[in-house]
Amino acid sequence: MNEFIILNLIDVTIAVIIDLILGDPHWLPHPVIFIGKLIKMIENKARVIAKSDKQLKCFGGVMVIIVAITNFLVPLILLFLTWQVKPLFHIVNVIILWTTIAAKCLKDESMKVYFALKDKDISLARKFTSFIVGRDTKELDEEQLIRATVETVAENTSDGVIAPLFYSLLGGVPLAMMYKGINTMDSMVGYINEPYTHIGYYPAKTDDLFNYIPARITGFIMCITALFMRASVFNSLKTMIRDRKNHKSPNCAYPEAAVAAILGVQLGGNNVYFGKVVEKPTIGDKHRELNKEDIVSANKIMFITEFLFLAVTVILIYFGYVKG
């Protein structure tokens, strides 16, 4: 068991390095594509069969079960089939782990917004922002685009970086892929507005549950990154704890509040989803206006958080399993 934990940690570390170098190359078919097709197929079937909102809500629960089990079993079977050939086993393990981590992809996509704003192309910036957020972007001004992008980087540092690493280390590839399926499902149907209010209820709640611990770990580690960002760790922690409930999600405010405090800006506030205004409280204190350089800073916080999480994990496993 100890040997597996250490070898899995090595594979996770290699996967992180590959992600930092390659990100999500277009030539590699990403598992999220197939997960998305499965989710869409279930959703379409549910909308045909369901005769009431209650039934549609129940189908959302069925979707959670199917997606979770499928995403757990497929990598488990692949690893079982390659277990006897150790080099092949580790190659498969690393490749699947790599696909669960989205640090470089998040950085690349958010920086497209940054460069569009730098070139003063607000239309292009709105287009790029629409690729990474669920809110309507066609009417957003520059500051709102920056806020949306910074919030996305903050939130997805937890959802797309720390959470996959957390589950990879906790239960290996099968648990990491299960989480990836649940998070993808939430991003596709987990909205409180129509047409997802009912079918998205259980996917959203399940994602909240799976992100409960990773979001808090992410928030606290982000506060430590203040040391590298010329900001106050104490103030970051104070702001995060104060504003941790200033979001409709029980998890998102943790990383967003930490980033807001480090940057000295205010995040949150009302957004438009599917043509309807969703009122949200603000997060952080407005010591200054947001500017496009905050997108760069948010990415720095993300990468430092990833490094610190991995470093702390290595230390804990070393003293817990090697020295212990």
Image (spheres, rainbow, N blue to C red):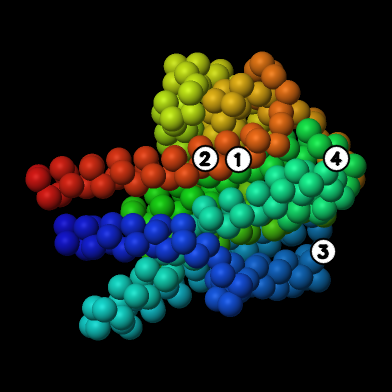
Callout in the foreground (2, 3): 2
**Marks 3 and 4: which is nearer the front?**
4
Q: Classify 154 as above or below 113.
A: above
Q: How many labels does the image show?
A: 4
| Residue 278 percent coordinates (x, y) | 81, 35
Q: Distance between the residues labelled 1 and 4?
A: 20 Å
**What's the amino acid at mark 3?**
Lys
The CA span between labels 2 and 1 is: 6 Å
Say which amino acid is labelled 2. Answer: Lys
**Looking at the image, is mark 2 or mark 4 nearer the viewer?**
2
Residue 259 shows up from this direction: yes
Contact between labelled residues 3 and 2, with CB atoms less than 8 Å apart = no
Badge 1: residue crowd in 10 Å (few <14, some 14–19, many ≥20): some
Is residue 315 left or right of 91 when viewed as pictured? Answer: left
- Residue 233, position as x, y percentages in the image: 44, 21
Q: Where is residue 185 in the image (x, y as percent from the top left)?
A: 63, 59
- Per the image, the residue denoted by label 1 is 296
In the picture provided, is 31 more to the left or to the right than 322?
A: right
For residue 140, which numbered disc appears in the image? Answer: 4
Q: Which quadrant would the C terminus be assigned to in this image?
A: top left
Q: Is mark 2 on a helix, strand or loop?
A: helix
First reached walking from the N terminus: tag 1 or tag 4: 4
Q: Are marks 2 and 1 in contact (CB under 8 Å)?
A: yes
Residue at mark 2: 300
The residue at 33%/57% (across/down) is 13
Q: In this view, does 275 lie above or below 93?
A: above
Mark 3 or 1: the one toward you: 1
In the rendered image, which residue does mark 3 sit on? 51
**Closer to the eye: label 1 or 4:** 1
